[in-house]
Amino acid sequence: MIFGIMGAMPDEVDQLCARLAEVTVEPYGGVEYHKGVLAGKQVVVCCAGMGKANAAATTQVLITKYGADRIIFSGIAGNMSSEIGIGDVVIGKTVLYHDAQLDMICQNPPYLKEYSGDPALISAAETACAAAGVKALTGRIATGDLFIGDSASKAAIQAKCAPDCVEMEGAAVSQIAAKNGVPCVILRAMSDNADEAGHEVLVVKKFSIAEYVATATKIVAAMVESL
């Protein structure tokens, strides 16, 4: 079994890369792929870059070139739920686009308007979160090529698809994984509330996400060990 583990920003994967043994690094298509061993399992860890195109391209490379037969995406997101708060985690039971014409996208493989997280990976994520003392919600993730940092945009997305969090890569990763028949799960730690305050903290001040990434790294490592 080979795990493909992805993030969108270097900060989201650097701590995980530091845990790998027997590491080799291969640049391909503008992305560095870190091949190594984590908890006795073969893994390939990479920073895909932000947005749907980067996420989709990198997912296909992980599957086709590196033989990944499980995909885990770990990163941060804007909270859209009253059930959780900053630092808590959303595990993607369902993932969809909030900025796409879904009735057209689903005319091609995998013929879906939304994508389901793999039950075994979801279960492993839930167990790892509980063991780490992290509050987790297994729910709905919405993806689009915009950073959501204002109340009007947040309200529009909430009205359209009622997600538990909003981010920029998950549905693209999930779509390509589903197209290839590869189990996948999206994990998101809440870094902000997808409003003006979130924009100020993450975009204007470029706030460090290290504290959230440390938790996510622990969760992903525990998942890999258990599977």
Image (tube, rainbow, N blue to C red):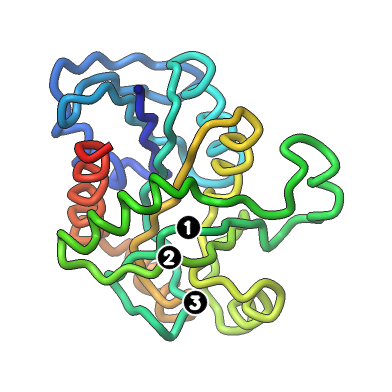
Residue 14 spot, x, y in % from top left: 23, 39
- Residue 107 position in % (x across, y down): 85, 42
Q: Taking 116 as reference, is 111 above or below it?
A: above
Q: Which residue is mark 1?
A: 92
Which of the pair 100/82 is nearer the observer? 82
**Quick one: 176 or 117, which is closer to the camera?**
117
Q: Which residue is mark 3?
A: 80
Residue at which label 2 appears: 138
Tell me if 139 is positioned left or right of 56 in this view: left
Work out which quarter of the rendered image holds the N terminus and state it: top left
Tell which circle, 3 or 2, labels the residue nearer the N-terminal end: 3
Q: Which residue is at 23% across, 51% downward? A: 219
> Secondary structure under badge 2?
strand
Where residue 115 appears, as percent x and y from the top left, is 62, 50
Q: Position of residue 192 (x, y in %)?
A: 38, 73
Q: Helix or strand or loop: what does disc 3 sit on?
A: loop
Structural distance between the alpha carbons of marks 3 and 2:
13 Å
Please tell me how crowded label 1 is: few (under 14), some (14-19), or many (20+) other residues with Cα within 10 Å.
many
Amino acid at circle 1: Gly
Label 1–label 2 contact, CB within 8 A: yes
Identify the mark at residue 156; answer none if there is no mark: none
The residue nearer to you, when weighing 73 against 117, is 117
Q: Are marks 3 and 1 in contact (CB under 8 Å)?
A: no
* Res 5 quadrant in image: top left
Which of discs 3 and 1 lies nearer the camera? The answer is 1
| Label 1 vs 2, first from the N-terminus | 1
The residue that appears at 31% across and 75% down in the rendered structure is 86
Of callouts 3 and 1, the N-terminal one: 3
Q: Are marks 3 and 2 in contact (CB under 8 Å)?
A: no
Q: Tag 3: residue type?
A: Met
